[in-house]
Amino acid sequence: MFMPYLPALPPAPPPLVRLVQADPQAPAKNPPPERARDLQAQGAGQAQDLSTGIDNTALQPREEGVPVGGALKPGEEVFLDADTQQYDQINRVFTARGNVKMRLREVLLSADQMQVNLDTRLAVAEGNVKLVQGEQRIAGTRMEYNFARKEGVLLNATGRIDTKAESKVRINTPLAADLTGASELPPPPKPRGGILRFEAKRIVFNAEGWRAEDLRVTPDQFDPPELELVSARATLREIGPGSNRLMIDSGTLFFDQNFAMPFPAIESVIDNEKRKPPYEVGSDFLDKGGVYYQQNLYVEFAKNITFQISPQLYIQQALSSNSFLDPKNFGLQNKLSVEYDNGQLTRLFSEINGLVLDDLENRVRARLEHIVPVGNHTLTFSYAYRERFFNYLLGFQTAQSNLGITLDSPLITLGSSGVRLSYQANAALISANTDQPQLDRQPDLGRFRVAGSLSKTITLLQAEFLPLSRETLRFTQIPVTPGLFLDVGTTLVQSWYSSGDSQGYLGGRVSLFSILGRFSRDFLDYTALSLSYNNGFVNGESPFLFDRVASREQVFAGITQQIYGPLRFGVQTGIDLTFGRAVDTFYTVSLDRRTYSLSITYNPVRQTGGFQLRVDDFNWGTNAYGRPDQVTDVVGGVERFNRNGPGSP
């Protein structure tokens, strides 16, 4: 059973006994006591002189790996308080019992009983042991702790890991006001979330983190947990204020206490950055010939550098080819992310679709970008090679090269009106396919574009929010609130090209979104309906196919329906009304729980899909609707890069 969340301990009472001072030669207002009668003089019952034998067998050090000795920094002092204290003058050992608290700067150690050796700098604590050391908060039954070195061993440990610390890097989503739509609903009460509870048989710790043996960890705040990760070994290291990184060697994921899935025998990372789970099964007919398997491995070079290497096997293509081991049936994806203390970010994405070395120029896709915060805006310098776009009516398109700079605004709310504003400016040198006969098949052109969007969501009907409880969180991390919402918006985009062409687009949309039920009962207790109509005016035409506004009038509709318990089925489709054909369709079957979800998604228009695993407080997630990595949607002539999700470069 998991212990409840461990709160921060209250400040210790004013110190009654100063155990040790860093510089014993330095004068002090209250010098450390040297004799038992001095201890007794500080307060009745606070210390007793026990120069005779003391039976403290249970409080003798017995753990290997705990260093002895060590010097305190100048000015540092260790204070001890308890109901009763005993002092052995010969061995210079304090023994304290009852509400024992020992404090050294930001370190607070409490227990039922404790023995402190002034010479070895060792504190041995027994019973209801709790340690608060910086961001660490752990508890156990017994601890041996070197208070000078801040190192120790804790047995039968429990504690928490915060996975929701904010990153220093802020990234603005392109034209966010145009994409929020009916999803920008009034927020319900936030779930507690972001807390991983853990148990371990033994923890060896220091000021930077800890190493655990026989670890059990769960994001669930209720017992019994519906999701647990069990591993023989794990290491936690602090990588910044409020941010920790948990590296697990190998283990097993248990779902609902009965279904188990092996956790790979590799180093996996759980931190505040959104990541993909170790396994990934997807479908991408264009680049990978259908169903593929991807193993995601993370390598840490430094605290601010993350490297992901993901070997791929194209299962469907391999089974249908003459040789399963043909190099074209294997691929490789790499991602590199470097965060800087000034808030800047460098990211690299590369993928080889088939390890055919003599055809790499047609199999490699890559994108490099450096993001710089400018006030509350972001400035992105980027270069892309063979970048893949989806332009709805025109399908998949590839831009051979794209060197550009983009300024993106944040999502701005205009006063108390509820109107949201976002805008963008972009300048780029682009080489991409065209169908204009007066140009080369793949011309090199310059493009300058400005865009802006306004939107507003109106709540027509909404039920009251329910409190967080096991009943309201059966199948979701936040309570579902029924309601009916109207979203309206307009977008203006103007692009100029060095060929003399220009493209202008002024569009508007009206969307209705409703939620019926609270998704807390077993049968038909959740229905989500959406309906959106988009229409616009186009002036001119882009010489490129990938950013051309080819569809002016569209309608999108979707439904997600609970079938039974956590099982839901959904379909979302978009139809071009001018040409009368479907431009996008997603089918989804999902198993949703409070802490995780499993889903299968397929898109017959894009011929993509996959098996999705989401674990919220492990910060695991996959691309929405099974979109392949580095496939960027183009809406209204603007590339809508996903710069915050796990599929981002």
Image (tube, helix red, strand yellow):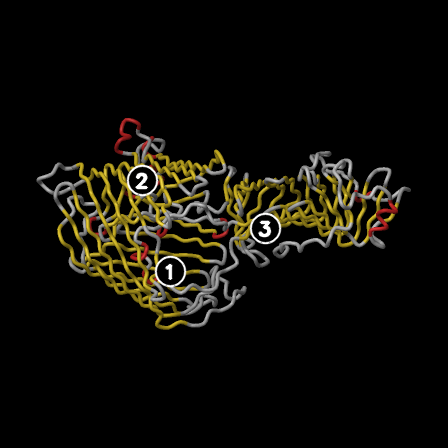
Q: What distance separates the C-alpha of mark 1 from that of mark 3?
A: 35 Å
- Looking at the picture, which amino acid does disc 1 mark? Phe
Q: CA distance from mark 3 to mark 2?
A: 39 Å
Residue found at the far top of this picture = 358
| Residue beneath disc 3 | 160
* Image position of 631 (left or right of 343): left
Q: Nearer the viewer, mark 1 or mark 3?
A: 3
Q: Residue at x 38, y 52 (%)?
A: 600
Decide which of tag 3 and tag 2 comes sooner along the chain. Answer: 3
Q: Nearer the viewer, residue 588 or 455?
A: 455
Residue 584 percent location from the top left of the image: 26, 54
Question: What x and y, as percent, mark residue 445?
Answer: 18, 39
Q: What is the secondary structure assignment of the residue under circle 2? A: strand
- State left or right for residue 558 relative to residue 449: right
Are the two marked residues, 1 and 2, in contact with CB atoms closer than 8 angstroms? Answer: no
Question: Is residue 1 visible in the rendered structure shown here?
Answer: no
Q: Which residue is mark 1?
A: 569
